[in-house]
Image: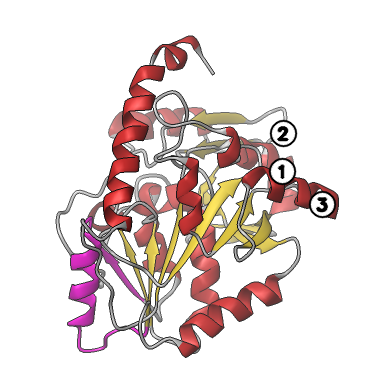
Amino acid sequence: MNLLRKLLFPFAILYGLITSIRNFLFDKGILKSYSFDLPVIVVGNLSVGGTGKTPQIEYLIRLLSDKYKVATLSRGYKRESKGFILAQANATAKILGDEPFQFFEKFKNIQVAVDANRKNGIEQLLTQKDKPDVILLDDAFQHRKVKAGFYILLTSYGELFSDDFILPTGNLRESRTGAKRANMVIVTKCPNVLSQEQQNDIRKKLKLTANQELYFTFIEYDDFVFGENQNINVSQVKKNPKILVAGIAKPKPFFDFLQNQKDVCLTFPDHHNFNDKDILEIKKLAKNNEIITTEKDFVRLKGCLPSEQLFYLPIKSAFLSGSENFNKTILNYVGTGSTNS
């Protein structure tokens, strides 16, 4: 924790008090929450950014979309549009935001919507002629105006919420007690091997209740990087001189996976909107070499850089163990609940 964050400790106490009062008012029904007549699943976190919400949403889409009509609803962070938008053929990352546009590009059999007001977004989705059977709320753990039927809380292996503190001293959006609202907790970005003893120690640190399920996942990288016109095996990409570009919250694992000594790594802020100066810098550093980026950044860089040079590395969320139980829990909730309560 740096000195400035320590100096801001009084503001963290004040912020924690405000969020605790807000949660108390929702818990007691003084501030109203709204339920809807279909299953609603929230994927979110207590901390700001970088816990792996996008691959977890994609896991749920793959699990559910063959059997149910799925819709995702996101805020659409840093989009240039306002209000409710349902993705159509003319959608872009600027209209939807990078993560919703990634869902739209990747999964053609679902509906993708954005609205900062999640209650209004759900109401608008339910007015559609082909209304969804289940809605996945992306990054909505603190959106108490909607009372979802199922809450999945993510926390990163290297930055557990139990070890963190309220903003601005730490990275928590609300008190650690907010974790009690979760039906299940997923520890993301774990090492590929984690002993049962280590998993039990983490459960104790998180102080979960007896009825909260706990799972551990890791990031699984694809065997290929993908461009508009061709794909390249990752084993070859690792050997090639290249430039690695990332505008995500925590790019180090991405760099570590692909980088060799000859490579140049360019880091930009999370959800960065690349401008002309950025594009010129990337082109200058890349020369004729490959430009490898994350899937989220690719949707913003596509069309700005030469298609024969630009590639992205897909990732997936994979369970260390217990994926069958996870799938069963989610499918049981969606399949047996006509409402989200």
Q: Quadrant of residue 122?
A: bottom left
**Image location (x, y in percent) of residue 6:** 46, 14
User: Nearest the camera: 279 or 324?
Assistant: 324
Residue 11 image-quadrant placement:
top left
Examine the structure image and report whether residue 128 is included in the region drawn in magenta: yes
Alpha carbon distance from label 3 to label 1:
23 Å
Element type at mark 2 = loop
Q: Residue 328 shows which numbered tag?
A: none
The spot of residue 123 in percent (x, y) is 19, 74
Percent position of residue 146, x then y: 28, 64
Residue type at mark 1 is Lys
Q: Amino acid at mark 3?
A: Val
- The mark nearer the N terminus, 1 or 2, is 1
Range shown magenta? 111-133
Q: Are marks 1 and 2 in contact (CB under 8 Å)?
A: yes
Q: Which residue is mark 1?
A: 238
Q: Count the labels in the image.
A: 3
Say whether disc 3 or disc 2 marks the residue closer to the N-terminus: 3
Q: Position of residue 263 (x, y in %)?
A: 64, 31
- Residue 223, above or below 251: below
